[in-house]
Image (cartoon, rainbow, N blue to C red):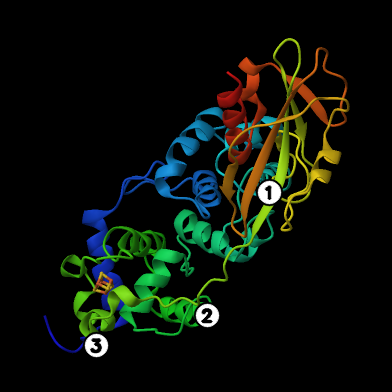
Amino acid sequence: MTHTAAPISSPDLARRLLAWYDRHRRRLPWRAEPGELADPYRVWLSEIMLQQTTVATVGPYFQRFTSRWPSVESLASADLDDVLTEWAGLGYYARARNLHRCAGVVAMEHGGRFPDTEEGLKTLPGVGDYTAAAVAAIAFDRPATILDGNVERVIARLRLVTDPLPGSKPKLKALAARITPMERAGDYAQAIMDLGATVCTPRKPKCLTCPWSDACVARVEGVAEDLPAKTPKKAKPTRRGTCFFVTDGQGAILLRRRVESGLLGGMQEVPSSPWIEEAETVSARDHAPVAGVAWRELPGMVRHTFTHFHLELTVLAGRVETGPEVADARWWPVERLGEAALPTVMAKVVRHAMGHLS
Ligand code: SF4
């Protein structure tokens, strides 16, 4: 190992990384085989699913989506509820609705073909800067610079960028852009993400096997594991709420559809009071969906963490003989709950309640 970083030119860095990629690329369900053209639909779908979710989680979802809806046209003509059901568990349901809208726009306004430039892609619903760059590079071989968490880490280390994220993003992007090659831009985009995911890992980067090892300033300075620096996050607040788990004489459970806008918009929920930061009070019971029920508080609590807050839910259980009509709600037979597209937090509420009632 040298004690100063070697001055390797950008084209040489790109060449080395591509040579490494040709030998060590990850096999991923949405990735084209060497020499095959990437399908823009599969690339776009995987990129939307991968936002804030891991490759391992996305794999089975991607397989189910593409076997059920193998083309953008088939996804466009799918029922939104079916799409939300398949999406359940991936979180961020606004993304699933945008996914469906985007498929509609591509099918109806673009003849089923995705725009092939970053600018064109950015006009689609739910496609932001990152996704547009990723699809332009991977599906259309455009020399677009993508900056995900993996790329940020690799570039911060290679070029010793010590300013903290997220403020350092523009600088990291500019540095990354200088290395992005004109040739094999799609492979390069995937190569740098693979390098971050498998070699330049957050802990214990495998610098000895890294194709950029001798050029990497953080490695030479012995500070690779300290980068990228991050601005300390504000502590997440905790919100609290009460869920009303009510069953009827046939054992059906009342589920309500949440309003379209906002968190978990349009998804089914076990009816609940608003989620607020103040301590819950008895007035939470004013939000009960059915009047005249003798509610019983179940022991324990359901906890879930969203991006911006922790949630603690108290669950009240009740029973009615005949389930009355409730606005935006349906009585769901237990055996059909799988079709209800319950978001993860609500699946936890149901499990918690059924665990105490069985
Ligand atoms: Fe990351 Fe180490 Fe490679 Fe530098 S040498 S880019 S720290 S794996």
Can residue 37 be seen here? The reply is: no
Name the residue furthest top: 250
Bin the neighbour count of mark 1 within 10 Å (Cα to Cα): few under 14, some 14-19, many 20 and up: some
First along the sequence among labels 1 and 3: 3
Q: In front: 242, or 65? A: 242
- Tag in front: 3 or 2: 2
Q: In front: 322, or 77? A: 322
Residue appearing at x 39%, y 41% in the figure? 29
Residue appearing at x 26%, y 77% in the figure? 12
**Residue 218 locus on image (x, y percent):** 28, 81
Residue appearing at x 58%, y 62% in the figure? 117
First along the sequence among labels 3 and 2: 3
Q: Do the residues labelled 3 and 2 touch (CB within 8 Å)?
A: no
> Viewed as shown, does residue 284 lie left or right of 120?
right
Residue at image mark 1: 94
Quadrant of the snapshot with the N terminus? bottom left
Amino acid on which the number 2 mark rests in the picture:
Pro
Badge 2 element: helix
**Residue 132 locus on image (x, y percent):** 57, 61
Amino acid on which the number 3 mark rests in the picture:
Pro
Badge 1 element: helix
Residue at image mark 2: 170
Can residue 277 be seen here? The reply is: yes
293 in relation to 44, above or below: above
Report the number of numbered marks. Answer: 3
> Viewed as shown, does residue 34 lie left or right of 78?
left
Cβ of mark 3 under 8 Å from ligand 1: the answer is no
Toward which corner of the image does residue 8 lie, by quadrant? Answer: bottom left
Looking at the rendering, the quadrant in which ligand 1 lies is bottom left
Residue at image mark 3: 7
- Tag in front: 1 or 2: 1
Distance of mark 1 from mark 2, alpha carbons? 27 Å
